[in-house]
Image: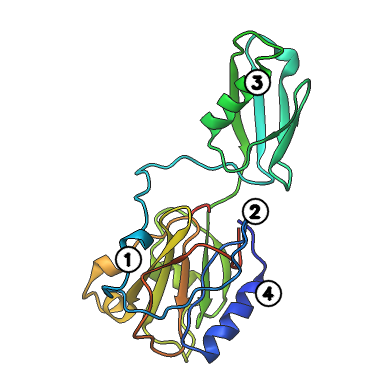
Amino acid sequence: MRVTKKSVLGLTVLLAVTPVVLWGQQLPATATSRSAPELTGSPDSSSQSDANRPVPQHRNPRYIVQRDDILVISFALSPELNQTVTVQPDGYITLPSVGDLHVQGMTVPEVVDALKKAYTKTLHDPIITVDLKDFQKPLFFAGGQVGKPGQFDLRYDTTVSQGIAIAGGLTPAAKTQVFLYRRVSSDLVEVKQLQLKDIMHGKNANEDVRLQPGDMIIVPETFISKFRKYVPYTIGIYNHGIP
């Protein structure tokens, strides 16, 4: 989950000139869609088909292995094979006697299963453990009319209002309307409108939701009355997490 400040500032410029909020993620190598979604429909529109609604995520999702993660692989019965590997930019790790194994997008238990399968040709019923030595730190993103658009470390139970404060607060041109983008499935992002004015005046504490890794906060310059509740999880400014 890495992003350049230049990219986020570019998104801010777009928001300053048009009442459209963009969202997405860097495409995987096999993806072909290149269109950026817009907030163009009512969140309660009946035209939103069930097919576009997300599949519920697991309550306690496991961490997904990413590029540049460092894995410590241990063999209980064959310690000579113990190794520390870095996930390469293409998602592969290189293993002695096995070769390349693609692990990006897997959970740690899935990596263990893949390793056991890969080593069955050279080891009988191998006992393998995998530990994350270094991994992608949780981040959130803030753009639009905030003092310091960019990416920020997500610490503890940070809420939307706290995230805005971390991002330098609101600019003079900002509205008290806030959009929160959150990945809800492998290919969809939920767009949630929050009324910052209610949060600031203590009218609706539930509006000040806790941020999750990969969330993006957008503060528009102009009020947006119509938007799509779910948008495709395609191109964008950073690489889920979560979202």
Q: Name which of mark 3 and mark 1 comes first in the sequence.
A: 1
Residue plotted at (34% across, 74% down)? 193
Image vertical order of residue 229 relative to residue 172, above or below: above
Where residue 177 sits in the image (x, y, percent)?
Answer: 36, 81
Frontmost of labels 3 and 1 is: 1
- The numbered dot on residue 74 is 3
Residue where numbered disc 2 is placed: 30
**CB within 8 Å, label 1 to label 2:** no
According to the picture, the residue beneath numbered tag 4 turns out to be 6
Taking 56 as reference, is 14 above or below it?
below
Label 3 vs label 4: CA separation?
A: 40 Å
Element assignment for label 4: helix
**Mark 1 sits on what residue?**
49
Kindly report the distance in space between the C-alpha atoms of the residues bearing marks 2 and 3. Answer: 32 Å
Mark 3 and mark 4 lie on one chain; the one further toward the N terminus is: 4
C-alpha distance separating marks 4 and 1: 36 Å
At label 2, counting other C-alpha atoms closer than 10 Å, the crowd grade (few under 14, some 14-19, many 20 or more) is few
Q: Position of residue 218 (x, y in %)?
A: 47, 75
Tell me the quarter of the picture where residue 47 sits.
bottom left
Q: Amino acid at mark 3?
A: Ser
In this rendering, position of residue 11 left or right of residue 47: right
Q: Residue at x 68, y 43 (%)?
A: 91
Closer to the observer: label 2 or label 3? 2
Number of labelled discs?
4
Which image quarter holds the N terminus? bottom right
Q: Amino acid at mark 4?
A: Lys
Mark 1 and mark 2 lie on one chain; the one further toward the N terminus is 2
With respect to residue 163, does 132 lie above or below? above
Mark pair 2, 4: CA separation: 26 Å
What residue appears at the point 66 percent right and 29 percent down from the top-left corner?
72
Label 4 neighbour load within 10 Å: few <14, some 14-19, many 20+: few
- Crowding near the residue tagged with mark 3, few <14, some 14–19, many ≥20 C-alpha atoms within 10 Å: some
